[in-house]
Image: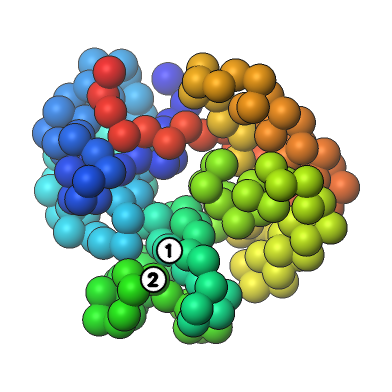
Amino acid sequence: MSFAHLQISTSYSLLSSTISIPALVEKARRLEYTALALTDYNVLYGVLPFYKACVKAGIKPIIGMTALYKKEENGPAYPLLLLAQNNQGYKNLLEISTIIKTGVGESILWRELIPYVQGLFALSPGKKGEIEQLLQNSQEKEAIDVAKQYLEVFGSNQFYLTVQNHNHHEAVERELKEKVLHLATRLDISLVATNDVQYLE
């Protein structure tokens, strides 16, 4: 099938997911997925077993990471979905993960992230993302400013807004989706459909 999950946490994301990589890839094979992403929080520990399992199953592995970043040292941390486009992107994921894991607070400062965006696609991660948080708080102007920052850093061909449907708090999800669609139209940002996958069932 042409659909591919682009936002998946596994048991390597401690306290966030119970998914094992063998079970994940096996289910994707049964569902006849042709591609599958791995986007654990801040780490790339699962990349090698994920890559090997996908290749064995005839599935294209998409290597990524959900990186937590802060604009200011004492500010809130927001997730950002990063997917490697090529080998340079994968190397930059390694650099970003290293900075996060050797620093304080399990996050990377925005200014530290900027030098490592080459070869990476960036996707807004859903309701926990900075843009989505602002939209949910009716701060449209601030959300526009943040989206413009993403566009400036990643470029219009590398940054995407996402729309999600988890069938959970449907009215809230629908309202957020409408706001994301409006923002995407206003700034001419491409959209992708994702779900924040943390469980197999």
In front of the other: 74 or 129: 74
| Residue at mark 2 | 107
Mark 2, secondary structure of its residue: loop
| Residue at mark 1 | 68
Q: Residue 31 carries which label?
A: none
x 55%, y 22%: residue: 169
Give percent across and percent down for residue 41: 32, 55
The number of numbered discs placed on residues in the rendered structure image is: 2
102 vs 160: above or below: below
Give percent across and percent down for residue 93: 36, 68
Residue type, mark 1 in image = Leu
Tell me the quarter of the image containing the N terminus: top left
Tell me the quarter of the image containing the C terminus: top left
Residue 71 seen in the current view: yes
Give the CA separation, mark 1 to mark 2.
5 Å
Q: Which colour scheme is used?
A: rainbow
176 vs 72: above or below: above
Give percent across and percent down for residue 29: 24, 23
x 68%, y 24%: residue: 174
x 28%, y 28%: residue: 199
Residue type, mark 2 in image = Ser
Mark 1, secondary structure of its residue: strand
Is there a contact, CB below 8 Å, between mark 1 and mark 2?
Answer: yes
x 77%, y 37%: residue: 179
